[in-house]
Image (tube, rainbow, N blue to C red):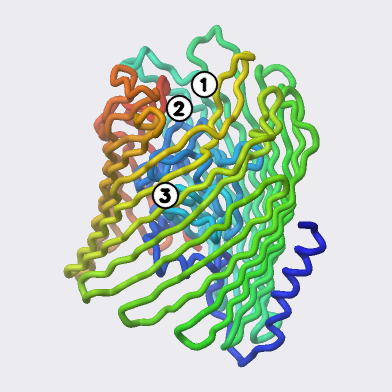
Amino acid sequence: MGIKRSLVFVFAVCNLSLYFGQEKTIDTVYIFDNQMNKVKLFHKITTLSLSDIQKNSSNLSEVLRFQSPVYIKENGRGAVSSPSFRGTTAQQTAFVWNGININSQFLGQGDMNNIALFGYDQLEVKAGGGSVIYGSGAIGGSIHLNNDINFNKGFSGSLNSEIASFETFNNFLKASFSNEKFSFKASGSHSISENEYEVPESRNYINRNGKYYNTNFNFAAAYKIAPFHQISWISETYDGNQHYPVFFESQTPTKYETQNFRSLVSWDWKKTKFNNILRAAYTEENFQYFANLEQPRTSGASGKNYIIKNDFNYFINPRWNVNVIGEFQQNKGEGEGTSGITKVSRNILSVAGLLRYITSSKISFEAGIKKDFVEGFSSPVLYSFSGKWKAANWYSVNLNVSRNFRFPSFNDLYWSPGGNPELRPETSVQTDMDHEFRIGDFKLTLSPYYIRIKDMLRWQNTSMGYWMPFNTQKVESYGLESQLTYEKQINQHYIKFNTGYIFTRSKDLEINKQLMYVPIHKIFGNVDYHYRFLRIYAQGMFNGLTYTESNEKKSDALQSYFVMNAGVSGTILKKYTVGFKVNNVFDEIYETMAYYPLPKRNYSILFNINF
């Protein structure tokens, strides 16, 4: 389907809003990912605030490793890192920036250590399929980087600085101003680390050439042009540099550089009977690989994405809501050096419709259907259903069923040698059920799930001597995610406790073996205690035996481990905070990726000023 047809669709949906209308004022807080509030009605979402993120301020990998069900495999601290939801792969995880899918068009995934840690108002983690709303790759789960805009808040700002082991320095500065009609927010962060640590107990490992640094800037603004109309803009710039660790001094040191830019403009029109959000976005990814630090780059690529998205909601009555989402994307890419990728492009049009029945009583549900028109592919019809039943004051249950997909990336199709233009999109069918029990200040959630993936894309070695992707693997994943939380305020004492246990069986059905780098057991826990100006926290994470080969060979597997972190901070005059953290308190020797142990006990000091 061509560009003209897609644009006609988008603006036709937008113009439907001319036929409805009673007045409704715009909310004081504007959230760029407007769909997330609806998703939370039917799905268990892990939401992490800035204070949660600061507990693991090394990188995004550390945050999710200790505070979510996700398994993270990392090639040494600060190096290449990828997530695994419910036994799926990194390519089956969607990274969503303010409602826009930002997975690399080349790799089909996101490197967690090349995504800024600071600059977002909320980090949210959703397990389970979400392709109807968030597109390709949202199979195992999605990671959401969200910003919001406040009005009538005046001026505020803060500065965070951290000094840590291995010559690590993290700095984050943000400031905002808003009145009744205008809001502006800006932030910047910079992290740098020599990152040379030693683990002599693990083959005398030294993290040689492990240096990394990155800089990130975020800007956001909104203006109420009329009581029911608002225009908003948000932009992010990221510049990162990773040196890849080498095992011996005689090896040639390498590095990887990346530059990303994202910008989103939104026009919101809100009335009593309807609301319409029209967005235009531009995202850009650039990366360069250096096989020798002292030599010119060996390969690289540049990708540009142009996105138009319209989200129309019509309220039949306070209970019934119809939601139509239309999106058009144009993806462009160009490789250089040894990648062999010339100029390539792809047009994508998608149309989704959702019907919601939402009440404050016992039963609510959402049903969705979506069709993607991906240039060069025959894409399946996707669907989703979510239902919630509040059976009693202490018990409720959510049922979610969905069909999701992922189309091949530019590397899958065009990498030379090895790209395979005959690939088909992956598809999956899955279901999960959230059982929520509330007793006093305790909340227990039990979430069994089942996923079956067809035509899974996998790179395999060929007789020609190079690797090539094929639609070969059929995967079945099932398991249980459980989480227990407790939160209590007694006078000036506040305590919060959160722990989770995850059981995962993810099998390649051709050989009936557990997939590589999918631990069968994981446990994580966090406890916070506040008293007046004092705050103390501790967190722990147990990871069970993890196979590194497809034959379940225990001698090559990563052994189970338990890692604990702890910290304390004090606030003076409500503006100045000083904190101290100890990571890996018990000096555990552990790996999340074979041959790349993570640091032993290490320390950091944090300074914070609010103004």
- Give the numbered dot on residue 245: 1
Q: Which is closer to the viewer, label 3 or label 2? A: 2
Measuring from the top left, give residue 232's x and y in whole percent: 67, 69
Amino acid at the residue labelled 2:
Gly
User: Eyeballing the image, is 414 above or below 48?
Assistant: above
Tags 1 and 2 touching, CB below 8 Å: yes
Q: Amino acid at mark 1?
A: Pro
Q: Amino acid at mark 3?
A: Gln
Q: Nearer the viewer, residue 358 or 236?
A: 358
Of callouts 3 and 2, the N-terminal one:
3
Residue placed under numbered mark 3 in the picture: 54
Up-down relation of residue 436 to residue 167 (above or below): below
Which residue in the protein does label 2 denote? Answer: 76
Residue 172 in sight from this viewpoint: no
Whichever of labels 1 and 3 marks the residue nearer the N terminus, that label is 3
C-alpha gap between disc 1 and disc 2: 7 Å
